[in-house]
């Protein structure tokens, strides 16, 4: 079936009821039909049936979509908005190349998704860090500044990742390991979360699980969904499947730290029609879900933490993976912890590289959440999505200047590893 027919068929399942509209963050910001899920579905249907000529305004309203999938979760007709949107972006990229993304945006995304560039990027960021403050003067560059700040902080980690896996060499522990898993680093964790990667290895090893990290793994390809770049998506999926294939049989799962990567790895079976892609997607599990079950069936203990902790639920965890309750179950393994769910009415605005492309919309959406945080009495906010964490950090930095309230934003795995009782 052609891409036109597939979009048209999927879009025909929409009965135009409008139930999704109040749940859409861009409708919340712009208040127009074109910036709502129903509007976007109708536009893509018309484009795919060649009843409508594209225009820049029309394509921008499609591009404004954050991909949060709140509309899909609430839709009573179970319209597959995720697939309509992904195919729609592919159609636009293939047929209307005049409406391309800005050069700078494409360059940043290219560097992020190419592990080969990461050591170079880390070096450049370190060398240029004295000039970071210049970027903060322009709001468009606030996110870039936050990115570079995080890369500089993360690359100053003392010991390399390789020292942390497989399981500790203590024979008493290692000999009991029965389970092996593969860790999917993802480009974002590689650049921004080296410590969290070490933390998850520590936790898995404590549950008597060995960890393998294949060196040649690539970006999952989620960033290319926004670009409508089917070729790159398929190339990256094929490379990852090839890289992991010899390890899959003896491994129980492929674990990813970033909810967006986990969701995209599960979609490989949709991108590539092969039994290997099916197997890869079937074994892909988000770290929250895997750890929740692994800790449950282990004897590990955590030190008490008598603190109120803010919990941000990323859209990928809530609307795509639908595992939000597992995050709360996981964190309640820490005795005494008091969890406070952050207002999650709408997406925070991060949405991968969206915060770089549309900083005004992204910051508008973030403001409500920063305001909610300002009224809370907690010093730590956890988020299981690196993009959301970076977005919150730059928003909270501004808030901190005004209020003096310092809030740390960390991955839940980091919090668990800190409280892990190794005695
Ligand atoms: S996507 Fe679903 S909820 Fe939204 S208008 Fe269509 S049928 Fe209704
Ligand atoms: S994915 Fe999110 S931003 Fe896009 S149309 Fe649906 S609710 Fe709106």
Image: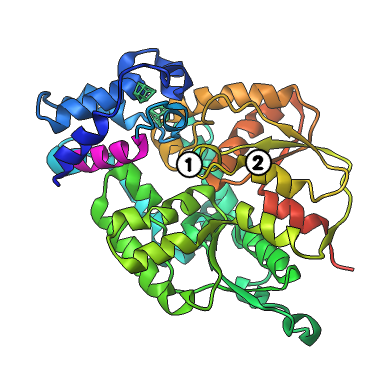
In the rendered image, residue 82 lying in the magenta stretch gets the answer yes
Q: Position of residue 42 (x, y in %)?
A: 24, 23
Q: Residue at x 25, y 42 (%)?
A: 87
Q: Residue at x 78, y 46 (%)?
A: 332
Relative to 78, 393 lies left or right: right
Between residues 108 and 188, which one lies in front from this camera angle?
A: 188
Q: Residue at x 12, y 23 (%)?
A: 52
* Residue that badge 2 annotates: 325
Q: Are marks 2 and 1 in contact (CB under 8 Å)?
A: no
**Residue sitting at the far top:** 31
Magenta residue span? 80-91
* Residue that badge 1 annotates: 320
Compute the Cα span from label 2 to label 1. 13 Å
Q: Quadrant of residue 90?
A: top left
In the rendered image, residue 140 lying in the magenta stretch gets the answer no
Task: Specify few, some or many for label 1: CA neighbours under 10 Å numbering under 14, 14-19, or 20 or more.
Answer: many
């Amino acid at each position: 079936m052609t891409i036109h027919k597939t979009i048209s068929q999927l879009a025909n399942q929409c009965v135009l009821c409008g139930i999704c509209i109040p749940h859409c963050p861009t409708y919340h910001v712009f208040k127009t039909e074109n910036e709502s899920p129903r509007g976007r579905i109708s536009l893509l249907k018309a484009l795919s049936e060649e009843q409508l000529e594209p225009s820049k305004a029309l394509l921008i309203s499609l591009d404004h979509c954050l991909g949060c999938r709140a509309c899909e979760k609430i839709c009573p007709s179970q319209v597959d908005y995720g697939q309509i949107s992904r195919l729609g972006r592919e159609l636009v990229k293939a047929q209307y190349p005049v409406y391309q993304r800005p050069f700078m945006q494409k360059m940043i995304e290219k560097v992020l998704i190419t592990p080969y560039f990461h050591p170079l990027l880390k070096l450049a960021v370190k060398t240029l860090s004295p000039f970071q403050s210049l970027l903060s003067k322009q709001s468009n560059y606030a996110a870039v500044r936050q990115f570079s700040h995080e890369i500089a902080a993360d690359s100053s980690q003392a010991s390399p990742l390789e020292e942390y896996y497989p399981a500790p060499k203590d024979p008493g522990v290692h000999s009991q390991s029965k389970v092996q898993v593969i860790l999917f680093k993802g480009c974002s964790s590689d650049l921004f979360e080296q410590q969290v990667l070490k933390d998850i290895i520590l936790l898995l090893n404590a549950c008597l699980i060995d960890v393998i990290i294949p060196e040649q793994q690539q970006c999952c390809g989620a960033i290319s969904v926004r670009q409508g770049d089917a070729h790159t998506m398929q190339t990256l999926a094929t490379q990852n499947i090839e890289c992991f294939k010899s390890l899959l049989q003896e491994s129980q799962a492929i674990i990813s730290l970033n909810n967006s990567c986990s969701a995209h790895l599960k979609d490989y079976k949709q991108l590539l029609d092969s039994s290997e892609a099916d197997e890869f997607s079937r074994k892909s599990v988000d770290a929250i879900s895997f750890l929740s079950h692994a800790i449950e069936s282990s004897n590990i203990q955590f030190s008490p933490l008598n603190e109120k902790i803010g919990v941000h639920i990323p859209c990928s965890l809530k609307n795509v993976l639908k595992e939000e309750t597992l995050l709360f179950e996981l964190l309640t393994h820490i005795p005494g912890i008091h969890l406070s769910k952050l207002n999650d009415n709408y997406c925070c605005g991060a949405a991968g590289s969206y915060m770089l492309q549309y900083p005004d919309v992204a910051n508008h959406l973030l403001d409500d959440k920063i305001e909610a945080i300002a009224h809370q009495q907690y010093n730590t906010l956890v988020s299981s999505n690196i993009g959301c964490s970076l977005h919150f950090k730059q928003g909270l930095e501004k808030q901190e200047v005004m209020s003096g309230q310092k809030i740390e934003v960390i991955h839940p795995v980091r919090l668990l590893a800190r409280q892990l009782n190794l005695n």
